[in-house]
Amino acid sequence: MSNVRRIKTTDLELKDRLVAINRVTKVTKGGRTFTFSAIVVVGNEDGVVGYGLGKSNEVTTAITKGIEDAKKNLIKVPVINGTIPHDQLAEFGGAKVYISPASHGTGVKAGGAMRAVLESVGVKDCLAKSKGSSNPHNVVKATMEALSQMRDAKDVAFERGISMEKVFKG
């Protein structure tokens, strides 16, 4: 994650999406205790996205905590003409994700947890595949890992100290 560009939440119009709610049961001497965990993705649909996990005894409080946590973990992702700059493979835990750019009009071809992240970042056209674990927590983290590794041509040219034309020639 050397390519991560942290973003401050000031003056950003962030939209939140609930990815998953999990009910956790703890058996105690006095009976069963139910708590809830919620994983939430926030983004401005213009290249900024973050995810967060909230845990509480109530669903609404867990979602609120998840949103606050997501606002603390925002990253900037290069989105070019509604798609991503290049193919990317990433994994987290047992989840493996593959994201590929697509031509205009394709739409977001992705599963539930990946779709929430990609739409929050502002991707309109891409192909995505999730393999291995379908656990929403790991899929979201793997997708964020893949997006954080994205680099556009300007960044590559700047890092190498060459012009844009030389980047595309080879």
Image (cartoon, helix red, strand yellow):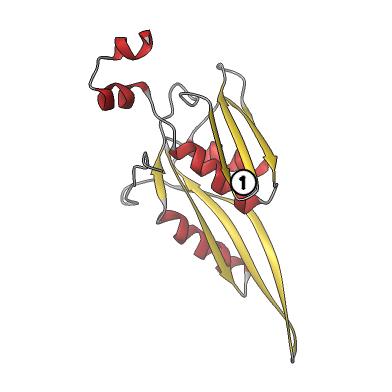
Picture residue at 68% right of the left edge, 51% below the top: 135
User: Disc 1 on helix, strand or loop?
Assistant: helix
Query: Is 83 situated left or right of 161 in this image?
Result: right
Picture residue at 46% right of the left edge, 55% below the top: 70
Q: Is residue 22 above or below residue 142?
A: below
Residue at the disc numbered 1: 139
Residue 110 in sight: no
Q: Is residue 93 above or below residue 80?
A: below
Q: Looking at this view, is 165 or 34 the one in front?
A: 165
Query: Is 1 situated left or right of 66 in this image?
Result: left
Question: Picture coordinates of residue 117 (x, y %)?
Answer: 55, 42
Picture residue at 36% right of the left edge, 21% below the top: 153
Question: Picture coordinates of residue 43 (x, y %)?
Answer: 46, 44
Quadrant (top left, top right, bottom left, bottom right) of the C terminus = top left
Query: Amino acid type of disc 1?
Result: Val
Q: Quadrant of residue 68?
A: bottom left
Residue 74 in sight: yes
Query: Is 41 situated left or right of 132 in this image?
Result: left
What is the crowding at mark 1: few (fewer than 14 residues within 10 Å), some, or many (at least 20)? Answer: many
